Amino acid sequence: MARRSDHSPKELRQLLVACGHALMAETGFAKFSARAAARRAGYTVGTIYNVFGSLDSYLLAINTRTFSLWADWLEAALARCDDGDARIEALVRSYFSFAEQNRHCWMAIYDHRRPVDLPLDEADMRERHRLTAIVDREVTIALGRDEGEATRRLVRSLIATVHGHCALHLGGSYALMDEPDPETQAVVRAREILQANLDPAWASAPVLNPTPSPGASPTARNSR
Amino acid sequence: MARRSDHSPKELRQLLVACGHALMAETGFAKFSARAAARRAGYTVGTIYNVFGSLDSYLLAINTRTFSLWADWLEAALARCDDGDARIEALVRSYFSFAEQNRHCWMAIYDHRRPVDLPLDEADMRERHRLTAIVDREVTIALGRDEGEATRRLVRSLIATVHGHCALHLGGSYALMDEPDPETQAVVRAREILQANLDPAWASAPVLNPTPSPGASPTARNSR
DNA sequence: ATAAAAATTAGACGCTGTTTAATTTCGGTG
DNA sequence: CACCGAAATTAAACAGCGTCTAATTTTTAT
């Protein structure tokens, strides 16, 4: 029987999350088992319910850890990166590479459907927003301006765009469509979308062949 | 005990798929149970293994049915639609509306991870390709040309873009980001991407103010 | 030392997917 | 009609799961 003096409450929580995260990385969401996770930590299932209250809450904590590592990963990639256009490409590519190198944990984020009556608490929220904040910052830089909520919406939409490529890629659907390089496709789409939103005037114009506007003629960039 | 003369092999297969599909719609992937599905059809679990060989194969059949209904749904929406730009918007919006009105079944497509040693057979492939084919056709029309494999890749990428918005939307992640209308965001992104790929010259050119190309000047519409 | 409190666990419950053996149904043959 | 073999269907068993409750152990406070 594990002695309760083995770990402080905080330590125990972290230990369980770490073991759960490791197990998730190995087995994936479908074969994940709370019993096995507890066993790996040297405890039994009951302790998980003691500490987290519910399995959903436990999975939430595990996924928040993935978000945290993900944000670190992006920052590390951006730190190795020059200014300018390269940063957006680095952002997209590191988004992908994290997902690829952490398949199971990355997918678990979306595999786990949190019940509506279990809102994520302040700390989880904050940790998860780090990811959005990074994209937000970089996109705002790339756009050269911050239009407030409109820019926030564009950022979310860009995330959704890259997410879609990544999700179909790792889910196998994209391979089924014989796409050899969804990552580069995502990079190109992100560029096109940013390009289209460089000048605010375009955003509200209904037209498909806009009149050029000053300050919206960036230097050449394309790699298809 | 169900008599084997109650249904022909083909009928039984269809019955089981129909019942499984209905159950999936009600319970969702996480709570789906082969026992419950068989019970609903008036049989027991064993019959499912008899007919489909494995649970994965059964789920595959259920999801293929969803693909089929989805393709029908898109075609129906497009049939109610004028030519021109409206068709792309209808495509995206019906993509969304199907997913919204068939939440559980739509998500089950991506929840179920097919084991690698279970390739989908010819018939499944064909049925699922109907969806891609529709988008392919409409995008080719919208582009006013068919550049072969390059266009195929663009189509897949557009699907991934819309899928990303839809997946985050129904998965709740998008709501978490406070986006009120991911569907419209997807429509706008699709337009921007198509716009950027209208003229082949644009693809390799840095330019933002294209000359209009024939057959690609739909009427004005924008709803942001 | 002892009692109260807290942490941990064992065990039960009903469920799951999966497999095997038994049972039932059916078509063909005498 | 009877029977037999093949095929379909099911019952039952197995290990595992999430979840909860009661019992047990450990710690703290008196």
Image (cartoon, coloured by chain):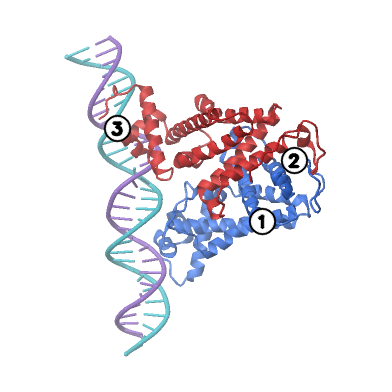
Chain colours: A red, B blue, C cyan, D purple
* x 60%, y 34%: residue: A86
Q: Residues within 10 Å of mark 3 (few under 14, many from 20)?
A: few
Q: Determine the image quadrant of residue A82.
A: top right
Residue A216, image x and y in percent?
76, 33
Instruction: Identify which amino acid the numbered label 3 is placed on.
Output: Gly
Say if mark 1 contacts mark 3, CB within 8 Å.
no
How many angstroms separate mark 1 from mark 3 (CA)? Answer: 54 Å
Residue at disc 1, secondary structure: helix
* x 60%, y 43%: residue: A186
Residue B65, image x and y in percent?
56, 58
How many angstroms separate mark 2 from mark 3 (CA)? Answer: 61 Å
Instruction: Identify which amino acid the numbered label 2 is placed on.
Output: Val
Residue at disc 2, secondary structure: loop
Q: Which residue is mark 3?
A: A42
- The answer to whether any part of residue B39 appears in the image is no
Quadrant (top left/top right/bottom left/bottom right) for the C terminus of chain B: top right
Q: Residues within 10 Å of mark 1 (few under 14, many from 20)?
A: many
- The answer to whether any part of residue A121 appears in the image is yes
Q: Determine the image quadrant of residue D2.
A: bottom left
Q: Which residue is mark 1?
A: B136
Q: Chain of mark 1?
A: B
**Left or right, A43 with reference to A139:** left
The one nearer the camera, A99 or B113, is: A99
**Left or right, B108 with reference to C24:** right
Disc number lying in front (1 or 3): 1
Residue B2, image x and y in percent?
43, 66
Q: Which residue is mark 2?
A: B207
Residue at disc 3, secondary structure: loop
Classify A157 as above or below A147. Answer: below
N-terminal-most mark, 2 or 1: 1
Instruction: Identify which amino acid the numbered label 1 is placed on.
Output: Asp
* x 29%, y 32%: residue: A42
